[in-house]
Image (cartoon, grey):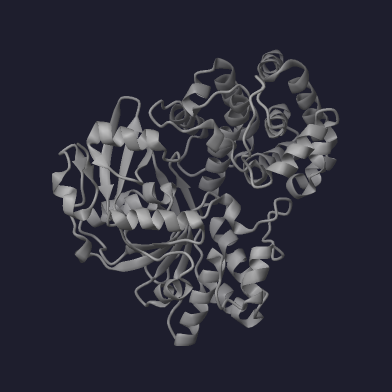
């Protein structure tokens, strides 16, 4: 019989499950975190849990909140188990379970007054967020903040009286602190974006600019937005994982997190209001995060895109199964060697080829259960961040681009909405109807796909890219995904 997770039942869990050695009463809040999904609880919250376990910095516990209906559901489930989470790390030969307790409270989305009260609380010195790559209101073509988005316009029209966006909440909290004579908190993005601190600053100040330019100027001059690189493969939780936790460890947890053992967090050390001593549990504090995040975004996230769309078209369900396909694994390796790594700038104390091999091992981990569908999600936001910037740099350097163009063509073919076996692909992007319509027209006229200027920008005008993309998409439709990858690998051998 599995034990239902709660503070009261920690002593009943199997000795194989590590539990917090500190008590909730010993903790006090220091961080408000927006978006307490799987990645946050496997990453930031797990680091803090280890720090608390060492008896350090107990005044930096997390108060969670969010802005979406799914955040409300998450909060209710976590509250029912005293905000505890079982984090299961998995490698090919072993699994380990640890109950973490870094979160001590949750404020429901929509309870704006209570959220802002937490933000204004002098004990709150960091406000962090994990709202996904698509949650920053970025124009895909310009990669700049979009002040015309309806959500932003609504918060501005309301003058932050009852904000519905993460950035509206942050802005309202900062301005109330200013009015009260309190120092600002630090705003720390934990999302997978290049320059995520700068992007977050642009979103907060861009919104406030629509209301009061003096307030926006104060935020720019007074508030710290450190950049950071985060990394840990963390799939969505399904009944499969919940059952595995019951069977393997005897824990009944409605919101467990399964993830790989590997993790990395590189942070710019810019926290004027103070910070927990996370360096004691493996966080790297550096003067410049940019080289680390560019490496990760282009090699790991770009690598995910490279295997996701061919695997999706071939009805492959799990990421490790894609890596067992010699063609797909070969395509990933060749693409990274020939087209991606050559345009990644040097990273301090890092061998990029060794990093690539680590990525390949991580993708091939059979215990993670990461799905191809998750990697294919939200391509309209991810392609402009993970693939197209590498394409631009390769074109500018006069380097090969056929593999990168093939990745983009495979994405187009995926958005057609049907695998090569004729199975329907369920909507997998906020812009799915539009993408499907474009992909269906592009079957006979590839250039139509590149007309999405908000995604491709001036890349659509580059004759090398247009020709390579068109050739790849036509070949996919004529010969199939496997033949296209074979042709790419053969051309590499003969070059």
Name the one closer to the observer, 177 or 273.
177
- Quadrant occupied by the N terminus: top left
- Is residue 299 at all visible to an observer of this figure? no
Residue shown at 23% from the left, 46% from the top: 4
When the figure is inspected, residue 341 is found, relative to residue 215, above or below; the finding is above
Residue 240 placement: quadrant: top left
Where residue 441 appears, as percent x and y from the top left, is 82, 34
Where residue 87 appears, as percent x and y from the top left, is 32, 43
Number of on-image labels: 0
* Left-right relation of 325 to 427: left
When the figure is inspected, residue 433 is found, relative to residue 493, above or below; the finding is below
Where residue 306 appears, as percent x and y from the top left, is 61, 30
Residue shown at 43% from the left, 55% from the top: 73
* Left-right relation of 194 to 101: right
Residue shown at 48% from the left, 72% from the top: 112
Residue shown at 62% from the left, 74% from the top: 208
């Amino acid at each position: 019989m599995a034990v239902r997770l709660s503070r009261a039942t920690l002593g009943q869990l199997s000795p194989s499950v590590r539990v917090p050695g500190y008590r909730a009463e010993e903790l006090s809040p220091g961080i408000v975190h927006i978006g307490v999904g799987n990645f946050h609880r496997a990453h930031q919250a797990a680091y803090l849990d280890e720090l608390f376990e060492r008896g350090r910095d107990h005044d930096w516990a997390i108060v969670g909140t969010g802005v979406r209906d799914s955040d409300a559901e998450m909060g209710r489930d976590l509250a029912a188990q005293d905000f505890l989470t079982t984090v299961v790390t998995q490698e090919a030969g072993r699994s380990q379970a640890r109950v973490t307790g870094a979160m001590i409270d949750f404020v429901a989305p929509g309870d704006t007054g209570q959220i802002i009260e937490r933000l204004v609380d002098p004990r709150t010195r960091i406000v962090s967020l994990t709202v996904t790559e698509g949650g920053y209101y970025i124009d895909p073509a310009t990669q700049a903040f979009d002040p015309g988005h309806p959500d932003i316009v609504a918060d501005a029209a309301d003058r932050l009286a009852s904000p519905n966006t993460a950035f509206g909440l942050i802005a309202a909290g900062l301005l109330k602190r200013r009015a009260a004579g309190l120092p600002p908190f630090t705003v720390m993005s934990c999302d997978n974006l290049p320059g995520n601190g700068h992007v977050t600053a642009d979103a907060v100040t861009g919104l406030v600019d629509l209301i009061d330019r003096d307030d926006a100027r104060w935020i720019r001059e007074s508030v710290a937005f450190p950049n950071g690189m985060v990394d840990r493969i963390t799939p969505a939780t399904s009944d499969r994982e919940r059952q595995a936790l019951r069977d393997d460890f005897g824990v009944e947890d409605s919101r467990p997190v399964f993830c790989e053992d590997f993790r990395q967090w590189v942070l710019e050390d810019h926290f004027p209001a103070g910070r927990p001593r996370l360096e004691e549990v493996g966080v790297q504090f550096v003067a410049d995060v940019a080289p680390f995040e560019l490496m990760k975004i282009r090699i790991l996230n770009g690598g995910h895109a490279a295997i996701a769309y061919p695997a999706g078209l071939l009805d492959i369900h799990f990421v490790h199964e894609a890596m067992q396909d010699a063609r797909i694994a070969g395509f990933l390796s060749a693409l990274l060697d020939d087209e991606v790594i050559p345009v990644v700038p040097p990273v301090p104390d890092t061998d990029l080829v060794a990093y690539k091999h680590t990525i390949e091992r991580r993708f091939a981990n059979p215990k993670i259960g990461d799905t191809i569908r998750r990697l294919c999600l939200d391509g309209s936001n991810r392609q402009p961040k993970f693939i197209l910037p590498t394409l631009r740099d390769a074109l500018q350097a006069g380097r090969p681009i056929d593999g990168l163009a093939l990745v983009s063509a495979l994405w187009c073919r995926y958005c057609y909405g049907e695998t090569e076996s004729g199975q329907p692909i369920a909507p997998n992007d906020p812009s799915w109807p539009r993408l499907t319509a474009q992909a269906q027209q592009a079957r006979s006229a590839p250039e139509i796909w590149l007309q999405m200027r908000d995604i491709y920008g001036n890349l659509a005008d580059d004759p090398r890219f247009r020709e390579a993309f068109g050739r790849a998409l036509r070949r996919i439709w004529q010969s199939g995904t496997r033949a296209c990858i074979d042709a790419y690998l053969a051309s590499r051998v003969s070059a």
